[in-house]
Amino acid sequence: MAIEKRDPVTGRVTTGHEWNGIEELETPIPRVVFFFLAVTTLFAVVYWVLMPAWPVGVTYTRGLLGIDQREVVMRQVEDAAVLRAAWTDRVGAAGFEEIMADATLMQHVRDTGRTLFIDNCAACHGTRGTGGPGFPNLAAGAWLWGGDPETLAETIRVGINSTSDETRVSQMLAFGRDGVLGREEVRSVAAYVRSLSDLPLGEADRGRIEAGKEIFAANCVACHGEDAKGSTDAGAPDLTDAAWIYGSDAQTVFTSIYSGRQGHMPHWEGRLSPVDIKLLALYVGTLGEDAR
Amino acid sequence: MKEFFHRRIERNAIGFVLAIVGVASIGGLVEIAPLFTIHETVEAAPDMRLYTPLELAGRNLYIREGCYACHSQMIRTLRDEVERYGPYSLAAESQYDHPMLWGSKRTGPDLARLGAKYSDAWHVAHLINPRDVVPESVMPRYGWLQRNPLRIDDLGEHLAAQRAVGVPYTDAMIENATADARGQANPEAAESSGVTERYGEATNVRVFDGNPSLVTEMDALVAYLQVLGQLTGAAHQETAGRQE
């Protein structure tokens, strides 16, 4: 036992050491610290007993409550699905016409469809479905493959130029780069195409329209049609309307014809359930309502 | 004054050192011991593919650019995450991740199941300027990825380093790493057939950045992002198994 020294000012015990005339009080750790240490230790022991805790070789102690977070989450997902089943079953079984005629179901489509759209589609098509350069506007009513809900659901399911075996396939050929048309010919057909939707043309472009019309008839009608209204069988856009995926300025239209285009929409089968795809097809159909 | 146990042990230098070693080793034991049986605790994923050299290079860029600071790659066992992102993450899915990139913070969304969700063109546009496609985004621009040529001459060494920590790359994979990176980013190249031969038919062989003549950092990063969650179907099988 060390010699007990007391600090003359406070009267409390010191550690007995002296550093350059300074002595240190020996203050005990407050009891409350020991109290909480004991409580937390007790909590830990109870937790070890009740919950999965200790690794034991290739397994682990499973705890008396038998809680498995993977089971818990799967049960929560199932419970939620059961709650929704009241109307998702009807969406799954009913035809599109029938659903669209049912105001209650359509309210569910709008609410749930919006969440699905934001989580999955909005990155490319925008939160309001208005798209952007290279990503189609879904609110414009200009559909490449058809805008009825059955077709939309099929497009969502298999995608366009996707990695699915059933994918829709479409390609705008690179007429200029692949040497089918010369630069001047591409300029002419671009001028003609832009004239179809009454876009303002420069003096030079106005002179090219006639030549462009002939080139169009020889090269483009197979997909875009003689009236240039496109084809939903080939996924070829209508060139007479005001909707442009890549842009309607002369340079962009030139690039589209010269270098070709091949958009890519991923397929959602496997990632989304059939009912989710149906909901999205119906929701996408409602996107244009505000605009129209 | 009472002689506390601690006071006694503090004054015995050797005893105190031994006590410290003893206590610290308990912590070490708890962390290290389970690793001895990790091969038996990680779920089986026989269909698991390896990162190709290009994807591995993209992974290195993901680390270099600090993507993990804002994006996690770990879908937790919570209902909202499972409903939004897909099946919860399994240990097997990151068994070839050295280091793992689970992350601990989400300023942006989780990326564990990002692969094949969006088009390459979207990824390129988004990385050059996120605001072009997602107006409300706060993500920085990464435009230089499109301009920087990817360094591919040393990819074999990267593969060898991964093999040293347990990723089963073969000698042929290490030998052809540079050619495979070129081949994966250009399906027209003669080197592209070797990629699917070595890494599986499901491997994405595409011009990721839209420029077939040059392998850029954009090619690598997009190739990596497009394979996230696509290396094995184990998570989908596990979820389907539990639903039955």
Image (cartoon, helix red, strand yellow):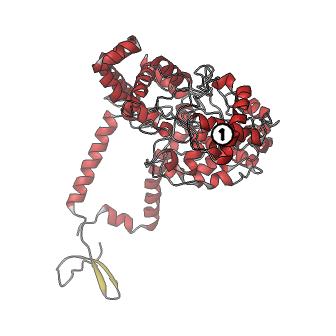
Task: Name the chain under label 1.
Answer: A
State which quadrant residue A222 falls in: top right
Q: In screen coordinates, is B18 left or right of B222?
A: left
Q: Position of residue B92 (x, y in %)?
A: 55, 33
Which quadrant holds the N terminus of chain A?
bottom left
Total numbered labels: 1
The answer to whether B15 is drawn above or below residue B92 in the figure is below
Q: Position of residue A255 (x, y in %)?
A: 67, 42
Seen from the viewer's position, the closer of residues B180 and A227 is A227
Seen from the viewer's position, the closer of residues B99 and A94 is A94
Q: In screen coordinates, is A12 left or right of A99?
A: left
Identify which residue is drawn at 71% across, 44% down.
B211
Q: Is residue A259 visible?
A: no
Seen from the viewer's position, the closer of residues B25 and B203 is B203
Q: Position of residue A269 (x, y in %)?
A: 52, 23
The answer to whether B52 is drawn above or below residue B241 in the figure is below
Other residues around mark 1 within 10 Å, as few (<14) / some (14–19) / many (≥20): many
Q: Position of residue A291 (x, y in %)?
A: 39, 34
Per the image, label 1 sits on a secondary structure element best described as helix
State which quadrant residue A276 falls in: top left
Which quadrant holds the C terminus of chain A?
top left
The answer to whether A37 is drawn above or below residue B86 in the figure is below
Q: Residue furthest right?
A: B190
Q: Is residue A261 visible?
A: yes
Seen from the viewer's position, the closer of residues B196 and A110 is A110
Residue at which label 1 appears: A191
At label 1, the amino acid type is: Ala
